[in-house]
Amino acid sequence: MEENSIASDQNQFQANFQIPFDYFVSKKHKAIESGCVLGFTDSFGNFVYGVQHLSHKSKDHPHCIKLFLDASGDTLFSIHRVNKGSWQCFRGKESRDEELIFKVERTVDEFTRTEFEISLTGENNEVSKTELKMKGSPFKRSCTIYKGDSIVAETSLMHKLGIKKMFVPRSRFRVTIFPGCTDHSLALALIVIYFDGRKLWI
């Protein structure tokens, strides 16, 4: 399994493998752990990551929060939607007192096109300049994450072809992580943010 350690600087997207790696995303899959509303599995159907949604708001948690879990159920990130077009991602569980990993701002929000800018944090939670961008069309389940001119990850709908066509729901699709990304969990957390609030999710 890809190591889940999170680097806090721009080196987290250095190359460490030579071929693309696929994850499969679904709201309804037998591998999804209890309590998770969304699951990421590998090509063998093994549950790798899950997402839990904290629907309640309280004085301690005024923002909508999603927890990004590993296969053991441990929280890797807490994703806070600050407002309609802004998110913050922290290491660990729920509290915003934890280490800030990145900030996301939606810069374009149209029916056929959305775009986001991602600022990674360095030492002392200082936010760096924009390091990554996401672009695509949520309606088409299309999202591509870029670092400069290089593709970090992208989503694609699944189609099974055999003797006859088999229906694959739009709520199940593939995320391909490309060589150069050393932190798959971070890239997948960005995918969760990209589709946040869409009917696909919670």
Image: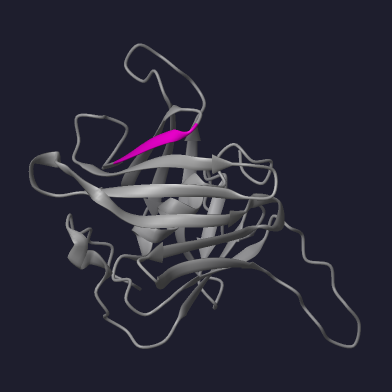
Part of the protein shown in magenta: 85-89
Image side of residue 131 versus residue 106, left or right: left
Image side of residue 159 versus residue 126, left or right: right
**Could one spot residue 14 in this view of the protein?**
yes
Q: Considering only vertical position in the picture, is 52 above or below 39?
A: above
Rendered residue at 52%/45% (across/down):
36
Rendered residue at 69%/55% (across/down):
171
Rendered residue at 77%/78% (across/down):
160
Depth check, front residue: 105 or 160: 105
**x, y percentage for residue 25?**
58, 60
**Image quarter in which the N terminus is found:** bottom left
Q: Main secondary structure of the magenta part?
A: strand
**Image quarter in which the C terminus is found:** top right
Depth check, front residue: 168 or 1: 168
**Could one spot residue 74 in this view of the protein?**
no
Residue occupying the far right of the picture = 164
Residue occupying the far left of the picture = 124
Depth check, front residue: 31 or 178: 178
**x, y percentage for residue 20?**
45, 81
Q: Is 182 in the magenta?
A: no
